[in-house]
Image (cartoon, grey):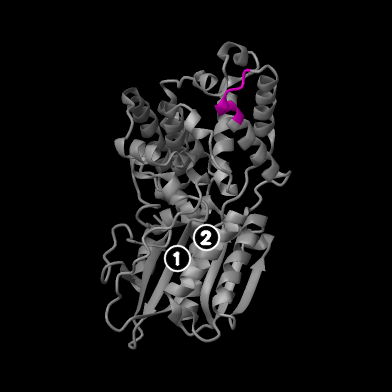
Amino acid sequence: MRRILALCALALCLLPAAGQNWTHDPALEAALKEDILRAGNNNYTYHHGDLRDTPPPAGYKPFYISHYSRHGSRHTWGSDYYVLILDVLHKADSLGILSDGGRAALEETQQVFDAWGGMDARLSQRGVREHSGIGARMVKRFPAVFRGSPEIRAIASVSQRCIISMNAFTTAVSAARPKTRWYLDTGEALMEYIGATGHKLPICKELAVPMKEHLWDAPCDSTYILGSLFTDAAAARGLITDLARFNKALYRTATIAPCWDIEERILPLMQFEYLYRYCAYEASSQYANYGSVEEIDPQRLDSAHQLVDDIVAKADEAIAGGKYAVDLRFGHDYPLLTLVSYLGVEGPGSRMPFSEIASRWWCWRELCMGSNLQMIFYRNRAGCVLVKFLYQEQERSLRNLQSVSGPYYDWETVKANIQGYRR
């Protein structure tokens, strides 16, 4: 604990100065301008990576898959933001000061509000399609694992969005392999390992506050939106009690709309500087709380140890001749982030200083809806076992660990390295 506090004290002294020289990262700026929906960070819909596979060493064939996935696209919580926007825009419409952009925002917000329908965090049909696609591609990509009548174990968080995601995934697998035999489960007792994040450690959130304050050190133009949605900015300003909250409401509404296949028209009307800073701010906050930030002792990631223990135990069970060909887990974004950080999966779990998060860790790419980790196990006739890590269905390397060949790692070496991360 003294070591953690010492590191935190050092970070608190050094990091505020970083905000004095705030500049845009050119790569992130270009990525957002290419697709402004990426500003939604972990509300971004699922986009898988490169599906090409590096051939395994001669004689090795896949025989087992271990998986953890975030639920698919879903809605947010509560209606306060939608009610706020609708109230302002309807009043503006009655006064005849609503622009074409304002009318588009009104229509989109009404659609998002209707989709919410009083059901917080409800999985959308897009979320269903996302997991159906992941399941179907897994079977097609690794047919040897699913041959015959495979037995598959699937565990879900108790959240509706996770259970329906599991249903979509397993239905797709059964469509491709009708003889599949299933073990399905969920329950509160399972949440201790499938949903642990370590977010209850106050030191993580306390450290994140001064580390991210500089992202707002040059206030955005909160009046920008008045000229986009209304024909009379002065009159419109009189309708809005809190302009900063109105901007945030628009942002939250716009970034969830694509999850429901609703055409997004609000973000292009908002100030790019605002969207850029919100994107960088949220990513920095999330990674500081749940990722592998250099300024925080890696022991804080030990909250993932129960999930890792489950992965290791079930993999060793399969290697020893266990009956399950696949283990599926359906949970949430922050446990997944803590998991890949604990395992040292490069990309989503890279270890980096806080100052580099905005330029290196893009939340919309690494923690979007449906994000998933797949561990593909291979074996040769001599019984040697290798494992390959896929994230967003794309091959990934492990931090500071030598592979046997390409993305293929010796399983015993990986297990030894897992223990090494508990320091």
Residue beneath disc 1:
374
Q: Is residue 310 visible?
A: no
Residue beneath disc 2:
69
At 58% from the left edge and 42% from the top edge, which residue is drawn? 257
Q: Is residue 219 magenta?
A: no
Q: Quadrant location of residue 188?
A: bottom right
Q: Earlier in the sequence, mark 2 or mark 1?
A: 2
| In the image, residue 162 above or below residue 360 | below
The foreground one among 188 and 407 is 407
At 68% from the left edge and 63% from the top edge, which residue is drawn? 187
Segment tinted magenta in the rendering: 97-103
| In the image, residue 290 above or below residue 185 | above
Q: Is residue 301 left or right of residue 24?
A: right
Which residue type does callout 2 highlight? Answer: Ser
In the rendered image, the quadrant that contains the N terminus is top left
At 55% from the left edge and 62% from the top edge, which residue is drawn? 131
